[in-house]
Image: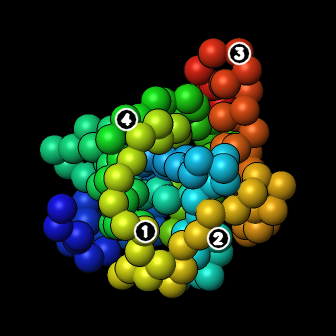
Amino acid sequence: MASLSWAESYIGQLRALAGDRTLLFVGARGVIRDDAGRVLLVKRADNGAWVLPAGAMEVGESITDCAVREIYEETGLTAERLTPFAIYSNPSAYTLTNMYGDTYQLFIVAFRIDAWSGQLLTQTDETTDARFFAVDEVPVSPTSITQETLNDLATFERTGTLIMK
């Protein structure tokens, strides 16, 4: 899987054309757990936040392919079985401005990674660390998205109902 630079990515190219208008951001995030039930988080290189592996979908890619690629790029792990459990698309809740001043209305699909392989990388082009955390020891992120996603996964696993927000 080839990694694209921000400028080469679909969203990077679109941002260059659109300027400061709000863009739709279609993406995926993955929850990977180890045998002890701990959750894998990556420490982002750009802002130092501990977050779930995630990112934007590229043209010609399915949302599942996006999740697999982003997980690989940020962790070195290959996601082999994925279960979607939540969709985040409410514009009043999921329109965010990032640290660069760019505003995005998010459409995110969250996946539970049911099987994965490979060797965990603790540093990549996008991350400075990666490790598993017990659910009650997950670091607080600048937004509450990580904890919200983990809560929604717990609800999905209890009810079997896809979460739609």
Task: Identify residue for label 4.
Answer: 81
Rendered image quadrant of residue 39: bottom right
Q: Earlier in the sequence, mark 1 or mark 4?
A: 4
Identify the residue at image location x=66%, y=47%.
Answer: 37
Task: Identify residue for label 2.
Answer: 50
Q: Earlier in the sequence, mark 1 or mark 3?
A: 1
Measure how far apart labels 1 and 4 are at the Cα level: 17 Å
Residue 61 location, x and y as percent? 21, 44
Q: Please, what secondary structure does the residue beneath circle 2 have?
A: strand
Measure how far apart labels 2 and 4 are at the Cα level: 24 Å
Please tell me whether residue 12 is drawn above or below residue 79 in the rendered image: below
Identify the residue at image location x=41%, y=40%.
Answer: 115
Amino acid type indicated by mark 3 = Thr
Q: Residues within 10 Å of mark 3 (few under 14, many from 20)?
A: few
Amino acid type indicated by mark 4 = Arg
Front in this rendered view, residue 112 or 36: 36
